[in-house]
Amino acid sequence: MSQGTPCSHLTSQPDLEVLFVTDTYLSIAQAFTRCTACLQHYQIELVDLTTSIRAFRISTLPSQVVAATVQSLQKGSCDVDRASAELSFVSQSAELLPGVMLRQEHSEDAGDNKTVRWVYTELAPGMQVPRADWRSLACDGSFIKSLNCDI
């Protein structure tokens, strides 16, 4: 996986639209997203979480690859391995960014109304974006804490 460059909106005032969720764990674990300002597509993959913050590995993706993959996944297939193979193909065209995307959810009231805030943060020198699948990571908040990022 080569290294990509985030759009200028991602590093200043990120607002991501979740297009298609491909995996969940209490909420989003992996999804295709896009910047609402410039429409750059990204894949986000969970690397850590706390009760209110999720940290995601984030990669740029070609728009045409996302569109074709989402259309195919929505259509479905009787082949149980097809979706997994398609997601693997998409990951091969992804370019990992040098930082992580933080997503904070805050409930405004006792109902389902939630405010979502996205923050992109580059890692300190010597830190690396975790590349393992979230199922094999601790997901105990320690990576988020190590970022020393106010969100």
Image (tube, rainbow, N blue to C red):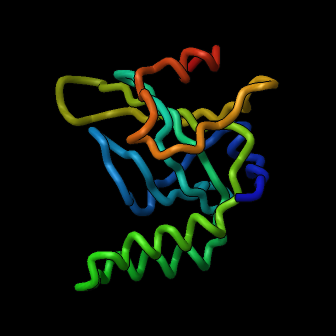
Residue 85 x/y as whole percent: 44, 74
Residue located 27% across and 38% down the image: 26
In the rendered image, the vertical position of residue 47 relative to residue 95, given as above or below: above
Report the front residue among 106 and 69. Answer: 69
Report the front residue among 131 and 33. Answer: 131
Give the quarter of the image for residue 116: top left
Residue located 40% across and 62% down the image: 20
In the rendered image, the vertical position of residue 98 relative to residue 35, given as above or below: above
Left or right side of 32 for 74: left
Q: Which residue is at the far right? A: 125
Residue 89 x/y as whole percent: 55, 73
Give the quarter of the image for residue 95: bottom right
Residue 124 x/y as whole percent: 76, 23
- Which image quarter is the C terminus in? top right
Residue 53 x/y as whole percent: 44, 26
Q: Is residue 29 visible?
A: yes
Report the front residue among 52 and 79. Answer: 79
Residue located 47% across and 31% down the image: 48
The number of numbered badges drawn on the structure is 0
Residue located 66% across and 71% down the image: 62
In the rendered image, the vertical position of residue 130 relative to residue 83, given as above or below: above
Q: Is residue 149 visible?
A: no
In the rendered image, the vertical position of residue 92 relative to residue 98, given as above or below: below
Left or right side of 125 for 69: left
